[in-house]
Amino acid sequence: MSKSVALVLSIFFVTACKTTLPSPPDGAERGPISEFIWGKSDIQSEKVSDDVLAEVSPSKINDKYQDAYDDGYNWEYFFTAYRKMSKYFSYEQSATDLMKVYYPKTYKKYRNDEFELASKKAEAVERIKQDTNNFDETRVHKLFTEWDFGKYDFDKGEFPLESLSSTTSYRFKQDHIRMPKNKFPREFKLYLTNPEVIGDLKMAPEKAKVFLQKKKNSRGRIDRELPAMFYFKFVRLDEGEGIFYGEVLGGEVYYGKDDKRVIKSF
């Protein structure tokens, strides 16, 4: 077989493979054949020896609060907490808006019949009151987030962790498209009162070097975003501003989005 024919067949083989074979998933380690067909992966593999992993982080996640609330947060959740913690919220004055928000179909159906509407409104308010009374404002909450880490400080032996501060807030807004017009707060904010308990990412220089290398892709770009989780509980409510204040009880910072080894506990 001539060299030119062999070259044509080789090109045909690579083209056929690309057409018929699925591309390896992002981050997967590619063997010599896969590299020949697809080229080297842009993202470095997350596979590291156990020795190196042990240098970087502990091995298990320690869940301190097994019963912590972790079913999602939105405006509706904080509105329920708002009603429970409020000293001045009036169900009677808010009955129509409550029905619009929680039972919009029923409101539209009976809004032109004042007698039926009054009856349905009373029923709706009683159900909403019951849901509010069942809400436990003292419960522990579990919130997942992402924080960035800065450049290594050789004097302090740590990466600065850009986590929470006294001015950091989590905001929960009404869905303007779905939500009917009402007089309730348009958004609620959550501030944490003790962000200093989190601290920075302390790490010896040799371990920090290994850690930083694993955060690089093949082009040398460093992903400085880290998944994190913290527990908190409500401590007070500023009704006029719709602001909740919470206390951080503890938490963890993780190695990466697909690697939940713990780098730091607090």
Image: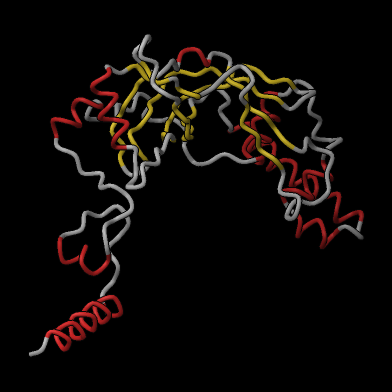
The structure's colour scheme is secondary structure
192 relative position to 211: left or right: right
Q: Give the image location of residue 197, x and y in percent.
A: 46, 13
Quadrant position of residue 166: top right
Residue closest to the far front: 3
Tell me which residue sits at (74%, 27%) in the image.
242
Tell me which residue sits at (84%, 35%) in the image.
92
**Considering the image in quadrants, where does the C terminus appear?**
top left
**Relative to 120, does residue 52 appear above or below in the rendering?**
above
Near-viewer residue (249 or 123): 249
**Relative to 8, does residue 118 appear above or below in the rendering?**
above
Q: How many discs appear? A: 0
Near-viewer residue (74 or 144): 144
**Considering the image in quadrants, where does the N terminus appear?**
bottom left
Residue closest to the far top: 155
Tell me which residue sits at (40%, 41%) in the image.
221
6 relative position to 210: left or right: left
Residue closest to the far left: 1
Tell me which residue sits at (28%, 26%) in the image.
209
Quadrant position of residue 239: top right
**Relative to 180, does residue 17 appear above or below in the rendering?**
below
Q: Give the image location of residue 207, x and y in percent.
A: 24, 23
231 relative position to 29: left or right: right
Q: Give the image location of residue 189, x and y in percent.
A: 67, 29
